[in-house]
Image (cartoon, grey):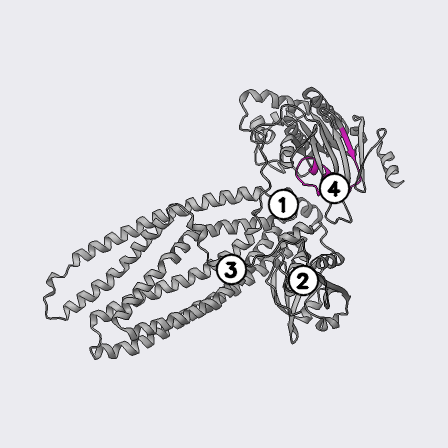
Amino acid sequence: MKTTLPDMIYQEETNECGLACVAMLAQTQGQTVSLDTLREMFPASDHGTSLDSLMVILARLGIVTTPVLFEHHELSTLPLPAILHYGASHYVLLTWRKGNHVCVMNPAVGEQWLPFAALKQEISGYALIVEPDTILPAPADLPPSSTAKTAPRAMSLKETAVVPGIYRLMLLTFLVSLTLFLMPTMVSNAINQAFSSVDNSGFPYGWFIVAFIVATFMALGVRVISERFIKRFVLVNSGLGFSRLLSNPLRFFEKRAPGEIYSRFTAWQVGLLQKIELDNGLRSDWVICAIALAIMFWIAPVLAAISAVGVTIMGLISVWAVFRDRWYTQQLQLKSAALNDFFMETLQGILTIKTAGLENRRQAQFAWFSRDLFSCLQKQKVYEQVKEGLYQLTGSLEMVVFMLLVLPMVHGKLISFGDFFAYSFLRQIFTSYVTRIFFSIIQKSQLNVIDTRAHSLFPQHAEASVPLLAEPASTVPDLRFDDVCYYYDPQKPILDSVSLSLPAGEQIAIIGESGAGKSTLLRLIAGLFSPQRGTCYAGETPIPRQQLAQTICLQSQEDILFNASVRENITLFDAQYRERDRPRIESLLASLALGDIVQALPGGIDALIRESHAALSLGQRQRLLLARALYSARPVLLLDEPTANLDDDTAAIVMDTIHTHCRQTGKSLIVVTHSDQVLAGFQRIYQLAEGQLTRLNSPLTSLDFKKELTA
C-alpha cells in the first residue's frame, strides 16, 4: 500500500496523544477517521492509552501493526510510518526520513524535523510499525468520510455574511474607497490645464477641497459604524461561544488543562475583532484594485503590465508567507497555552510550593516556558522582517523599472505630465490595496489556525433536546438505577452492572477504597456523566440525564467559593431570592455552627468572600459549602465526604443538621464517607469495590471495612 503524508492532528485532551497518532497513521494507509470519532469509540482514560490498546484500535480500523522493541542505535532503521513511545507517557508519529533527520508528527507541539540524535534522548525503545502485507477488512462501523469539495475554510466569508447590514457596511466602505480617485483626477486635470494654453483660473479647486472634506467625514462616519458592527459581532459571538463552551459535559473539562482552554478561547475571542474588517476588505478591495489597474492600463498599458508583474511576485511571496505564518501562529498559541497553564497551576498550588520550598524549581520552570515562548516570538519577528523586506524589495524594484520606462515616455511626450502624476497616484492606490489584500489573506490564514484550535471547545453535536424543568421538582422522586455500566476500557469497567434504589426520603451511605469509583458513581447519579449502559427511573418512568441533573444537588470536594458575598455563595446567585429568605440563610448557618463566624465578617452574610479566603478556615469553608447544598430546593442531596476537615464535635453537629434537614423537608440523601462517626447515622450502607455496589447487612466500622476489603 502506498504511504501518504498525513495532515497534522493535535491532541485536544491531556491523554489522547495515542488517539491522535492513530488518526494520522490511518491517513498514511488511506483511511480517514477524525479524532472526534476515535474519542467517541475509544475514550482514553486519565492514564492515557497503552501500546496494546493502540494495536486493538488500529486493527478495528483495518490496519495491522506489530509492537517492536529496538535499541537506540536502531532508530534510524525503523520501518516508517511508526508510532513511537516518546518520553514518560507520550506518543509521536514518525512519517518519513531523509539522511539523519526524520519528520516527527507530535500531537502536543506539531510537526518537527529532528535529527535522530535528538530523538534518542527521549525514546523508551518501544514502537508500533505497520505490517504492509497483512490486510484486514475495511471497518463497517465508522461514519463515512465526506468527499464533497468545499471552499477552503481559511478564506471563507460565510461567518460574517450572516451579520445583518454587513453588505450595507461593505457598500459604504466601497464608496469611501472610491474617493481615493479624487486626487489623481484633480492632479491630472490641474497639471494638464496648467501646461496648456487654456487659462487655468477657472479650475474648480474649491469643489475639490469640499470633496476632500466630505470624504474625510465619510471615512470617520464609516469607521464609527464599523466599530458598532464589530462590537455587536464580538459580543454576540463571544457570548454564544461561552454558552456553547459551558454546554460541554463535565468530562470535557476534567480532561483538559484550564490554561489550554483559557488560551484557546481568549485567542478566538480576540480574533473576532478582526473578522468584520478583514472580510469586508476582501469583499471590496479587489474592486478598487481592478478599477485602478484598468485606469492604469488605459493611461499606459506597458507601465500597468510592470505593476501586474510586481503584484504577481508579491502574490508568490504571500503564498510562501501563508504557510510560515500559520506555523508560527500555531506554535505561539501552543507555547502561550503551556505558559498560561503553568502560571495558573502555580497560583492554585501556591501553598504546596511555599511549604515544600519549590519556589526555585518553579522559577526555573517558568524561565524555561518563557524562553520557549519568547524564542519563538523572536524568530517570528525576524521572519516578519524578512517577509516585509521581500515585499519592500519587490516594490522598490518595480519602482525602479517604472522610472526607467516612464521618464523617457514623459521626455518623448508619449505621456503627459498630468497623466504621469495621475498614474503615480493610481499606482500607489493599486499597490496599497493589493498589499492590503495579501495581508488580509495571511491574517485570515492565521485566524483559521486560531479558529481550528478553538473549534473543539464548542460542541458540534448537541444532545437530544430534553424539556428542562421550569423549577425544581416539588415532590421527592423514587429513583432507581438499573444495570449501570461506565468504563474507558470495556475490559476494565469502573462501574459494572451497578443497581441502586433510592426511595423518596431515604438516607443511605456509600463506602469504598480510594479509586474504587465513588466519585464517578456520584457524578452518574447526579446526571453529570452518561453511562455506556443502564437506565435511571423516577418511579416507573425513565428519566433523561438532563432532567436528573435538575433533580439532584451534588456537593463534592471540587466545589469552590465564588468571588461574591456569603449570601450569593449560599443561594448561588438565585434570582428568586428576596429579603424574606434572609432568616432561612441565617438559620442554616446557625445550625452548622457558622452563625457567629459569618456575623463577625464585615457585612455579615453580605460580606465578600472568595476561594482561599484568609478569614475562613478549611472547616468553615466546608460548612459554607454544605449550607449551599442544604439551601438548594432540589429534592435529592448527594454529599461527598461532608465532614472532611471537621473535628469530631463539629462533624456530629453537621451530620445531625443534615439528617434533621432531610427528615423535615423529605429530601433523599446519599453520603460518601470513610468516617465511622458518619456511618453510625445510617441504616442502609453500600460498599463499592471492583466495580460492584453491594449492600452491607449491618453498619461497619473502619476496621471492619478494611478487613472486608482484604478478605
- Residue placed at 49% from the left, 45% from the top? 238
Residues rendered magenta in the picture: 508-532
Classify residue 297 by image quadrant: bottom left
Counting residues from the start of the chain, the first of labels 3 and 1 encountered is: 3
State the CA–CA distance, disc 1 to disc 4: 21 Å
Tags 3 and 2 in contact by the CB under 8 Å rule?
Answer: no
State the CA–CA distance, disc 3 to disc 2: 30 Å
Q: Dot 3 corresponds to which residue?
A: 149
Q: Dot 4 corresponds to which residue?
A: 485
- 626 or 73, which is in the foreground? 73
Q: Dot 1 corresponds to which residue?
A: 253
Identify the element where label 1 is drawn. Answer: helix
Identify the element where label 4 is drawn. Answer: strand
Q: Dot 2 corresponds to which residue?
A: 92
Q: Position of residue 505 (x, y in %)?
A: 72, 24
Q: Is residue 699 visible to us here?
A: yes
Counting residues from the start of the chain, the first of labels 1 and 2 encountered is: 2
For residue 36, which numbered disc appears in the image? Answer: none
State the CA–CA distance, disc 1 to disc 2: 24 Å
Q: Amino acid at mark 3?
A: Lys
Classify residue 35 by image quadrant: bottom right
State the CA–CA distance, disc 3 to disc 1: 34 Å
State the CA–CA distance, disc 4 to disc 3: 41 Å
Tags 4 and 2 in contact by the CB under 8 Å rule?
Answer: no
State the CA–CA distance, disc 4 to disc 2: 32 Å
Identify the element where label 3 is drawn. Answer: loop
Q: Amino acid at mark 4?
A: Cys
696 sits left or right of 456 in the view: right
